[in-house]
Amino acid sequence: MKKQILLFVAIFFTFSMIYAQAPGEVRFGAKAGVNLAKLTGEDIEDADGKTGFHIGGLVEVPVSEKFSIQPEIIFSQQGLQSKDQFGDVEVESKFKLDYINVPIMGKYYITDGLSIQVGPQIGFTATAEQEVEVEGDGGNELEGTEDVSDSVSGTDISIGGGLEYRLTNGLFFQGRYMFGVSDVGDDDEVFGDSLTNSVLSFSIGFSF
């Protein structure tokens, strides 16, 4: 927790320095949308993706006429789900990961309103749960949820990019793909091989 607090403080001062040195008009905004998330790794190639949502705020700081730096703070639902059949028994498993993500994107305007974005992201794990539902022949059901926070890394590092189109009234539409470069698991006995996050997101937002 102390490390996470120090990281938040470092990010805050970085944002303040960028804002103070901005040569043009700084924009503030908010966005929300859908995540198509999954975990990638050798042991879970057949697992399905997990649909979730994200919501948060952003600051766009111009560096030049064509280039901006855009830090964001986003709450993001991620993870994966799988469904297996064992005879007459169906087992559905959901691995729920919620993050507070802080992407810092470099934003280049190809033309008026249309920009391409590339940059890193650090995520702080908010919750981590394993949910299992078992349904047997005859409609009998069992379900349970387990907190697996102790087996999950407290931080997640990703890198990626996307496209955004902003209208003159401030409304914008965004698509982004982020892929993890750090292990999700913090316990090899629980997760086995290395697992990384993979998230395709679509957002709608407003900036002013």
Image: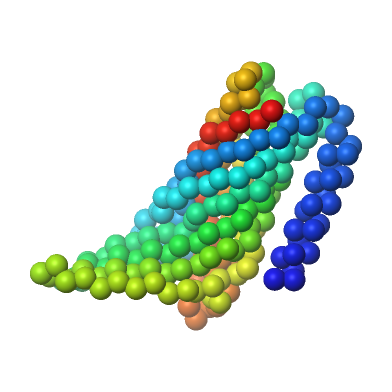
Q: Quadrant of residue 30?
A: top right
Specify the farthest residue to the right: 21
The correct choice, above or below, for 187 with respect to 21 in the image is below
Confirm whether residue 175 shows in the render. Answer: no
Residue at 29 percent of width and 68 percent of height: 133
Query: Which quadrant does the C terminus fall into?
Result: top right
Compare residues 47 and 91 and report the one nearer the observer.
Answer: 91
* Count of picture labels: 0
Residue 146: image location, x then y, percent: 43, 74
Instruction: Classify residue 2 as left or right of residue 30.
Output: right
Compare residues 21 and 169 and report the one nearer the observer.
Answer: 169
The correct choice, above or below, for 90 with respect to 110 in the image is below
Residue at 54 percent of width and 73 percent of height: 149
Residue 22: image location, x then y, percent: 85, 34
Specify the farthest residue to the bottom: 189
Query: Which quadrant does the N terminus fall into?
Result: bottom right
Chosen colour scheme: rainbow
Residue 5: image location, x then y, percent: 74, 64
Residue at 67 percent of width and 19 percent of height: 111
Instruction: Classify residue 40 as left or right of residue 106.
Output: left
The correct choice, above or below, for 106 with respect to 193 in the image is above
Specify the farthest residue to the left: 138
The correct choice, above or below, for 26 with respect to 100 in the image is above
Residue 31: image location, x then y, percent: 58, 38
Q: Quadrant of residue 157?
A: bottom right
Compare residues 75 and 192 and report the one nearer the observer.
Answer: 75
Confirm whether residue 23 shows in the render. Answer: yes
